[in-house]
Image (cartoon, rainbow, N blue to C red):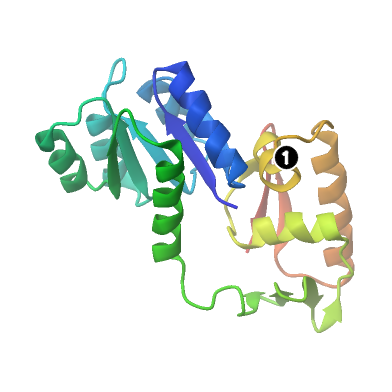
Amino acid sequence: MAFIWVVDDEKNIRDLIRRYLEKDNHGVRTFSSAEELENALQNGTPDMLILDIMLPGNDGLTLCRTIREKQDLPIIFVSARGEEFDRILGLELGADDYLAKPFSPRELVIRVNRIFHRLQPKDTQSKPLILKNINVNREQRKVSINDQDAALTGKEFDLFIFFAESPNRPFSRQQLLEQVWGFNYDGDERAVDDTVKRIRKKIREKGALPELSTVWGYGYRLDV
């Protein structure tokens, strides 16, 4: 599952993209302006951005240029401005793809997945994930610390592997709910807190060197 942020000033377009991406098991957060996105980027980074060009305030092209100066993450443009100049300029600024409105939501999902597939290292899922003295076996859904099984439950493993695949990156409780529990989950953020506490206790008991830390007022991260 990837976490994708969508920036478009049209609510119906944001909702449409969100609905299709969620059906494809992606986590989605939406914004109506470049300023909203820039504020959010101060506290975290998604796995991909989907940007409209025609935005209030800073447009999508300016936003893409600003982001590319600081970080490298996949960007797809969707825009009613389908002129060749805009498409070429967007790609030159570092966008990975460009779709002109109106577009097929399903085509957008396919392009999103193709980009992720292209960026995915070969045989990632079959290789163990090693974080200092923690060994994560994705296929067996098993976490070992100093060669001892940490005995995580299914949901504990899902949450831990989510942290382990993005070490040192903070996640809000809401992001964790959306990514690990899913958007249809009816519970509240206490589920995150309770699960983190159980994981933290189990890995500490086995002498884990990485620490599942609290980011006060925000959420959690796995410090490695």
Judge from the rendering whether residue 64 lies leftward or rightward of residue 108; answer left or right. left
Task: Indicate the position of residue 130 as horizontal and vertical percent values.
Answer: 64, 76
Task: Indicate the position of residue 133 as horizontal and vertical percent values.
Answer: 71, 77
Task: Indicate the position of residue 117 as horizontal and vertical percent values.
Answer: 45, 63
Figure label count: 1
Q: Residue at x 79, y 73 (%)?
A: 142
- Above or below: residue 63 compared with residue 45: above
Tell me if residue 166 can be seen: yes
Q: Residue at x 35, y 49 (%)?
A: 71
Judge from the rendering whether residue 157 lies leftward or rightward of residue 26; answer left or right. right
Tell me if residue 200 can be seen: no
- Amino acid at circle 1: Leu
Q: Which is more toward the observer, 220 or 19? A: 19
Judge from the rendering whether residue 221 lies leftward or rightward of residue 68; answer left or right. right
Q: Residue at x 26, y 25 (%)?
A: 80
Q: Which is more toward the observer, 77 or 68? A: 77
- Above or below: residue 205 compared with residue 54: below
Judge from the rendering whether residue 151 lies leftward or rightward of residue 162; answer left or right. right
Q: Residue at x 60, y 73 (%)?
A: 125
Q: Residue furthest left?
A: 85
Q: Quadrant of residue 181?
A: top right
Quadrant housing the C terminus: bottom right
Q: Quadrant of residue 128?
A: bottom right
Mark 1, secondary structure of its residue: helix
Task: Indicate the position of residue 223 as horizontal and vertical percent values.
Answer: 64, 58
Category of crowding for the residue at label 1, using alpha-carbon neighbours closer than 10 angstroms: few (below 14), some (14–19), many (at least 20)? many
- Above or below: residue 146 compared with residue 189: below
Task: Return the residue at label 1.
Answer: 177
